[in-house]
């Protein structure tokens, strides 16, 4: 089963009024509902992509971590597809073009075996 981590503290620079969900929480809930249990959604606080909210990451032990930034609710289905593609990958070594099209430009970084590489552009 695929799994995705979504930052619920995004956007930390524009806190919502009391009792309103953050954009990150709304994105996480939208992905959870749309996935219908087909992937696991883990809500976390901060994925170090704060200046470019909302953020999410694909990660599993022994695999390259892929982080996304600039996510909006319209990315919900693409995130679910990406989590499924990532789960099928043996090592997480996926180029942006292996992911759904609307996520190509939203890859914010990758971490491979202790080596961090920030995406360009
Ligand atoms: S607050 Fe969301 S990535 Fe830092």
Image (cartoon, rainbow, N blue to C red):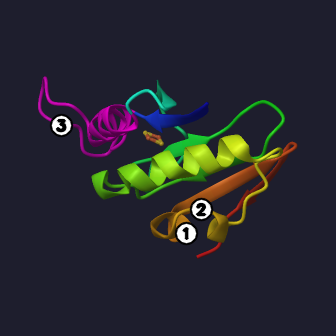
Point 52% across, 70% down: residue: 105
Query: In front of the other: label 2 or label 3?
Result: 2
Q: Secondary structure at mark 1?
A: helix
Badge 3 is on which residue? 16
For label 2, being within 8 Å of ligand 1 is answered no
Q: Quadrant of residue 88?
A: top right
Badge 1 is on which residue? 104
Q: Quadrant of ligand 1?
A: top left
Point 68% across, 40% down: residue: 87
Badge 2 is on which residue? 99
Q: Tell whether 25 sits left or right of 113.
A: left
Outermost residue on the top side: it is: 19
- Span shown in magenta: 8-35
Seen from the viewer's position, the closer of residues 113 and 104 is 104
| Neighbours of disc 3 within 10 Å: few (<14), some (14-19), many (20+) | few
Any part of residue 21 in sight: yes
Report x, y in % for residue 120.
65, 73
Q: Secondary structure at mark 3?
A: loop
Is mark 2 in CB contact (under 8 Å) with mark 1? yes
Give above or below for 27 relative to 44. below
Q: Is residue 98 magenta?
A: no
C-alpha span from label 2 to label 3: 31 Å
| Neighbours of disc 1 within 10 Å: few (<14), some (14-19), many (20+) | some
Give above or below for 61 relative to 57. above
Point 26% across, 36% down: residue: 22
Point 54% across, 36% down: residue: 4
C-alpha span from label 3 to label 1: 28 Å
Q: Secondary structure at mark 2?
A: loop
Query: In front of the other: label 3 or label 1?
Result: 1
């Amino acid at each position: 089963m695929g799994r995705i981590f979504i930052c619920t503290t995004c956007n930390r620079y524009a806190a919502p009024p009391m009792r309103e969900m953050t954009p990150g929480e709304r994105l996480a809930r939208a992905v959870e509902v749309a996935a219908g249990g087909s992937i696991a959604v883990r809500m976390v606080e901060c994925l170090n992509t704060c200046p470019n909210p909302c953020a999410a990451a694909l990660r599993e032990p022994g695999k390259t971590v892929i982080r996304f930034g600039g996510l909006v609710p319209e990315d919900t289905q693409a995130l679910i597809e990406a989590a499924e593609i990532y789960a099928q990958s043996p090592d997480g070594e996926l180029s942006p073009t292996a992911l759904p099209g609307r996520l190509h430009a939203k890859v914010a970084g990758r971490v491979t075996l202790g080596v961090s590489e920030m995406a360009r552009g």
